[in-house]
Image (cartoon, grey):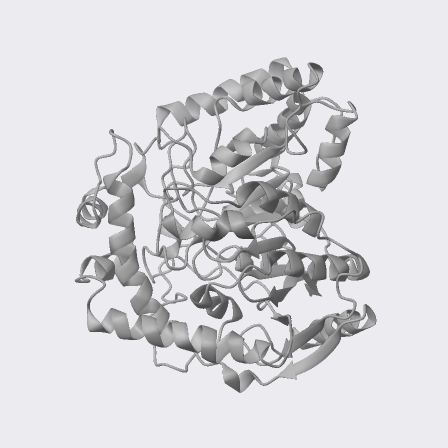
Amino acid sequence: MARRRFTAAAMMALLALGACSREEPAKSYAVEDVPLSQISADLAAGKTTAVEITESYIERIKTYDAPLKAVIMIAPDALQQAAASDRRRKDGKAIGPMDGIPILLKDNIDAKGMPTTAGSYALEHNIPTQDADLTRRLREAGAVILGKVNTNQFAGLRTTQGLLGSTVGGMPHNPYDLARTPAGSSNGSGIAAAVSFSAATVGTCTTGSVIGPASLMGLVSMRPTIALISRGGIVPISLGQDTAGPMARNVTDAAMMMNIMAGTEARDPASAEADAHKTDYVKALSIEGLKGQKIGVIRGMSGYSEVTKPLFEEAVAVLAAQGAELVDIPADIFEDLSQEQRVILVYDFKQDLNAYLAASAPAQQVRTMTDLVAFNKADPRENMWSQDLVEAAEATTGRDNPEYVNALAYAKKKAGPEGYDRAFAYGVVAVVTPTGQPAGLIPPPGTPGHTISERPKGSSPPSPSMYAALAGYPNLTVPMGQVEGLPVGLSFIGPKWSEAALLSMAYAYEQASHKRMPPTAYKQAIAAK
């Protein structure tokens, strides 16, 4: 694949940074597996500088990314951003705890000066003149926008025929076992966070695309209440379900990211209530966050199996030991909603992507779904892949079609009032369930199979992340342990605006269990060369 060749500017940026790194070698500050919160403290104490930290992350990317295919490009001004942070700090004008902290963004999030490709050459000239709202908030907090990471093309809405990753970024690999999947579509964000290519990363999630990769790569990630984080400046699939979310190596770092990213923005009318509900998520953290909390326990959804059961039962015991009152929730509340989800997403994708493309950068030529279908057929970098999901979206006739109206109404009812709301009616503040299965082997390119493939209803177990997405409820995953060296996560799911409570409960569990183990397989692959 032609990674990092989608624009001359991208390649020049990488070469320039490589030259800079050779002339001024990274200093002694070692970033591997160092928490964002610790880096922040070390910056405040003068133990390091933003330039040293940024150089260290760039050096790690140059050293380890080849077998992982996580990073698409490094921001051409990354070191200048870091130097500006150091000047602020020297002048006593540091902005706050995120000042000088390098962050990588999924490549469907707008950042001025870099293409937003969503993994497709159809968007290689989509260089935004305005940041996404979350990017703007991170910049205003002093964060260094380090670059862009890989993603399943159009966050997975290209094909059901086995395109893992993207034509722009190539096929990504799980750092715990390079033969296994990192999930999707925020796989680049997950890999980069897991192997310390930045202090934390930002992914996006329509169904479970920050939750799944986090579970498979030993991370903490939060899918917040819909529109608590504005979607302004993010390439969409479905504005009814899309959200961004932090991906980090511990709960504190995820909370620090949430403090910055959440908030109301005019480009996203659905975010109107965000300012009224956001809070200081770091201050909410407590090692007693489980004490006295009534929590529902769900067995039987898609993450629960013979291989995850022992870890889940161990996790449930930890919750009880930390003072939680546990209530069993019957799994027959839930059903397979994958086929309703498929209908919803293909209809929304056309309408919402057309709106984004219509307002995209002036040089961007593909400006409608119709243009995208034609581009994929004509461009040799794209036409080797099926585009059945794009074509299905193009064939839709609008959101007033009864097929869409009925599927949306049914799925929303089953996910919310007749799904998680029924669980919460047991008097619980949240529910817990295994996030998913351990990472499977990467299938050969072109292998049929996709989360929203057409198949008989009921052929898949109900997905906890899909239910949370359809209901618009927050979902947080935290490491639960490993199955034969492969991480799996524990999900905490709550009602709207319960992010602070979920983070506090997950923090108490994390501090009592300490289940995260960093990956090493990617280092072995480099050493073997």
* Relative image position of residue 205 (x, y in whole percent): 46, 55
Count every numbered label the image shows and give the total: 0
Q: Furthest residue to the front?
A: 276
Vertical comparison of 505 with 305: above or below: above
Residue visible at 41% across and 66% down in the picture: 451
Q: Nearer the viewer, residue 474 or 393?
A: 474
Residue 148 vertical placement versus 493 (above, below): above
Q: Quadrant of the N terminus?
A: top left
Q: Position of residue 196 (x, y in %)?
A: 64, 40
Q: Nearer the viewer, residue 372 or 352?
A: 352
Residue drawn at the location 43% of the way across and 21% of the way down: 12
Q: Residue at x 58, y 31 (%)?
A: 143
Q: Can residue 180 be seen by looking at this rendering?
A: no
Q: Quadrant of residue 498?
A: bottom right
Instruction: Name the spot of residue 280 as percent of width and height, x first.
Output: 65, 46
In the rendered image of this protein, does residue 513 appear above or below residue 48? below
Q: Is residue 358 visible?
A: yes
Q: Quadrant of the C terminus?
A: top right
Viewed as shown, does residue 402 lie left or right of 410? Answer: left
Image location (x, y in percent) of residue 482: 69, 63
